[in-house]
Amino acid sequence: MPAISVSAPGKIILFGEHAVVYGYPAIAAPVIQVKAKAIVNANPLAAPGNIHIQAPNIGLDADLVDLPAEHPLVTAIQAVTQFLGVHHLPACSIRITSSIPVAAGLGSGAAVSVALIRALSAFLGKPLDNDCVSSLAYQVEKLYHGTPSGIDNTVITYEQPVYFVREQPICRLSVGKPFTVVIGDTGESCPTAITVGDLAQAWRANPEPLKREFDQIARITDAARQAIEGGNTAELGPLMTANHQHLQTLGVSSPELDHLFEAARSAGASGAKLSGGGRGGNMIALVESSHAQIVANALQEAGAVRTIVTEVKPQGRR
């Protein structure tokens, strides 16, 4: 049986992070320049049920039975087998690789889950549709983030921009005109579960200040949706900057993120903001495509450990 190989892209949140956890809208887009890949190979010489997993990015080389039950890869595999009603897996090896930085706001965990779920279900001869893949990946996301919004697994599964409101039908975003975004990585990792948890604690103690910020972020996100769908990309820069200022007020930015934010603006970006959980990870900047490398260079000079230039395009265009 030939190897089954599946990849899944990274993602950026363009607008609405953190507010999305509380039922407000967010906009996210795939980042195809970075990917997670899962390769499943049959191992007919091994005993049935013998599953060997390699994930060199995290130094993992072990049999499935030797991993703790709460390991995300174990959870993903069990989610597939339980959903499909498979009680005994054929012997196989699973190799996971990824070029997506971990805990940087680019959806590394969700991308690994989506790639693994797709590859394993195909290996079992029962490939899953997008709705099933996203739902199973969301189960794994709960291990990473505690109370995830569901936006990461959604945008990564469907590989297209989405306007997302928790527990509402998925709205695939119509992009009226392509626009270019430069991603700058601070090199500082902060798991999303930490910032989400801190805001949850603040919400329980006194929700009104957070609600005021989330209301403003929601207005920005809805304005951004209209601009994206209408092809009015010039409006997005100021909206990004305003969104970042509200995230600063919420306490989820950091000196490193703010420094890159200022560097991008000084280099000619029309707007910028942190993207994802914050307190590290990535920021994004809206730029003219002809100016993207100049902004990327400025971010590197300001301390970004890596930059990615990506384009948000209408569905079907690569």
Image (cartoon, helix red, strand yellow):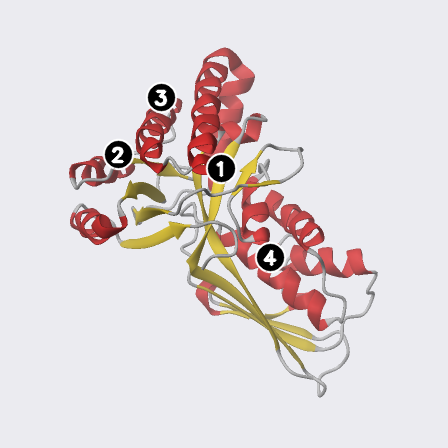
Name the residue: 36% across, 53% down: 310
Q: Position of residue 149 (x, y in %)?
A: 58, 36
Instruction: Give amino acid for label 2.
Output: Asp
Mark 1 → mark 4, Cα distance in angstroms: 19 Å
Circle nearer the viewer, 1 or 2: 1
Q: Position of residue 45 (x, y in %)?
A: 71, 88
**Residue 258 numbered tag:** 2
Residue 126 quadrant: bottom right
Task: Tell me: residue 201, above or below residue 131.
Answer: above
- In the rendered structure, which disc, 1 or 4, sits on the residue that comes first in sequence? 1
Q: Please state which of residues 152 and 255 is positioned toward the viewer in this rendering.
A: 152
Instruction: Give amino acid for label 4.
Output: Val
- In the rendered structure, which disc, 4 or 3, sits on the residue that comes first in sequence? 4
Disc 1 packing (10 Å; few <14; some 14–19; many ≥20): many
Image marks 4 and 3: residues in contact by CB distance under 8 Å: no
- In the rendered structure, which disc, 1 or 3, sits on the residue that comes first in sequence? 1
Q: Position of residue 163 (x, y in %)?
A: 54, 37
- In the rendered structure, which disc, 3 or 2, sits on the residue that comes first in sequence? 3
Tell whether 137 sits left or right of 177.
right
Residue 271 quadrant: top left
Quarter of the image with the N terminus in it:
bottom right
Name the residue: 52% across, 15% down: 205
Tell whether 272 sits left or right of 220.
left
Query: Mark 1 = which residue?
Result: 27
**Residue 249 numbered tag:** 3
Which SS class for mark 2?
helix
Which SS class for mark 4?
helix
